[in-house]
Every structure is written in C-alpha cells, then in structure tokens.
Image (tube, helix red, strand yellow):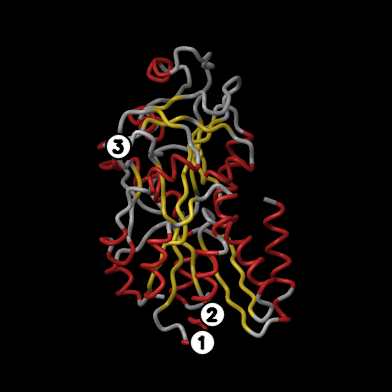
Amino acid sequence: MFKNLFIAAMGLCTLAQANTTITGAGASFPAPVYQKWTYTYSQENPDTQVTYQSMGSGAGLNQIKAGTVDYAGSDNPLTLEQQQAAGLEQYPMLTGGVVVIVNLPGVKNGQLKLSRDVLARIFLGEITNWNDPAIKALNPKLRLPKLKITVVRRSDSSGTSFIFTNYLSKISADWKNKVGQGSSVKWPVGIGGQKNPGVCNNVARTRGSIGYTEYTYAVEANLTCAMLENADGKYIAPSQASFSASAASADWNNAPGFYMELTNVPGATSWPITGVTYIIMRKDTPADKKAELRDFFMWSYTKGAPVATKLNYVPLPDSVVKLIEPRL
C-alpha cells in the first residue's frame, strides 16, 4: 500500500510539467491498479498527467456530479435511467472479488468455511460467537475458539458495501427485508472502517473479527480469507480464477448503460461476491478533455491489462472492450 501511495505522490509532483491534467476520484476497490495506471500513463505521456484519489464510491459520485473531477470511480453501478437523469455515462473497467476476512487464532487462510445462511446471520448479529454450533458444523476439523464475533464494515458510502449487501440480499430474505442493499445501509451490528484499508486495519487488530474487502487489500495485508458457499453449493476460495469464472457469465450485449451484477452467479467454480468497477464521466465534458480521457481509458484496457492481472483483478475481455470503444 505504501508503494501505491508513493506512486500517487510522484504523479502529483509532476503535474506542473504537463499541458493537460485529468483528475479522478472515488472507489477504493480499484485504487491499487488505478494509481499504478495513472502513474505509468503519465510517465509514458508527459504532456498529460492523470491522477486518482481513493475516497469511496459515494464521494466519487458526488465529485463527478459537482464537476470537480474529470472522472469518478464507482463499484455501485448506475442504471441507464440514473445516468440519463444526472447527465452521466459509465463504462466498466475491471472485475474483482470482494472477500470475507477474519482474525481467528489458529485458523489459516482458506480453512474456515462459511455457508450463505451462516454468513448472513453473522452480519445480522444473530450468530455472535465463533464456537456457535452452526459454524462448528461446517468446520468439524477446526478448533474454533470461544470468542465473540466482532463485525467490521464500512463507515463511508462504499461501492464495496454495495456489492456485499447486494449479495446478502440475494442469499438471505431476512437481510433483504431488514437491511437491503446499497452503498450505505443501516448495519445491524459492527464497527466501521474508512475505505477498504480501514476495514482491513480494524480486522487485523481485533481478535475474533470478520469483515469484507476487495481481494488485493486482503492479500497485501496478509489477512485470512474464508471459503464461501457459492450458488451451486460449492465452497470456493477467492482467487483470480474464481473471479474470472463469475465474470464469464456476464452478458454485456444485453446490459443497458453497462449495468451489471455478478453476485451469486451460477457455476461450480464461481466466486459468489464478484463485482464490476466502473469509471463515470459527465456527458457535457468538453470534447478535447473527453478525447484525453478516451485515450487514457483505452490504454488502461489494453496496455494496462497485465498490471491489473498482476494485482489480482480480472481485465475485461477483448469482446467487451470492442463494445465500449465506439461509445467512448
């Protein structure tokens, strides 16, 4: 994470040398790859400096609506009607996984299994201890401690929260009726953390905690990820392969305004909490600035794809990029 912050800082230091500046802000979900992209693109194109500030999807949407940035990042997709009403347009950039992270003494990465029912009941506050019979039944070989469960969730308006609550609403009628989905919801229990790093930090320092975050943050923080039950009833570990399996089901040809949900999709190897992260622009962006944005985004889809893969994201397939290109 410190490397990403350094890269972003270096990009800001060279702004004065550029003829054109492009500013972006929003979702922390894709921030590791966006910060790498903006730095590398600016180095390769010294006349154009691109920046991205991680502040959460909700804040990013507010910024683009106010016209204080040139593009926003969001994991909370807008419907075509919402885009038209606000004078915005959105384009998918990447696919990635939201994972469940835990801090449990003696439990290693990929050992803990959580069913759909148990996961929802934990975040509803109905299961409050790690040695609960429902968790023990799923993990008979694990020595689960008699330890209180501390739920950690986002305290800011978050696209990662939208993806996670969208999933919980699909797998639990109680969650759907009592809490629902959104970038900001009234959480039944838990302590809050700012952006994905805030959730990771709280989980890392709180014994017995459980939270959710984008996969890259969990990997960089060396946090323990749980295996989750997917739509086919299989217990799956988070990986680029399982995220790709979920993304393969996307029908982008029939997605008005590129609105897409990839949670709880069928497939024996599909990760159940997969999301799409988007860039959002204003329709009234001046033509010269829009041309600069288009060049940067097309570079990201093509030359930036290997960087995304290295950081555990799933780049969009060429067929989807070909759908996007003429609209940009």
Seen at 48% across and 55% down, the residue is 315
Residue carrying label 1: 288
* Closer to viewer: mark 2 or mark 3: 2
Q: Amino acid at mark 3?
A: Ile
Q: Disc 2 to disc 1, how far (Cα)?
A: 6 Å
Residue carrying label 2: 292
Q: Disc 1 to disc 3, how far (Cα)?
A: 46 Å
Seen in the image, is 239 located left or right of residue 46? left
Residue carrying label 3: 171
Q: Nearer the viewer, residue 277 or 191?
A: 277
Label 2–label 1 contact, CB within 8 A: yes
- Where does the image place residue 86, in percent across and percent down from the top left? 35, 74
Q: Disc 2 to disc 3, how far (Cα)?
A: 42 Å
Task: Specify which label sits upstream in the sequence, 1 or 3.
Answer: 3
Task: Specify which label sits upstream in the sequence, 2 or 3.
Answer: 3
Label 1–label 3 contact, CB within 8 A: no
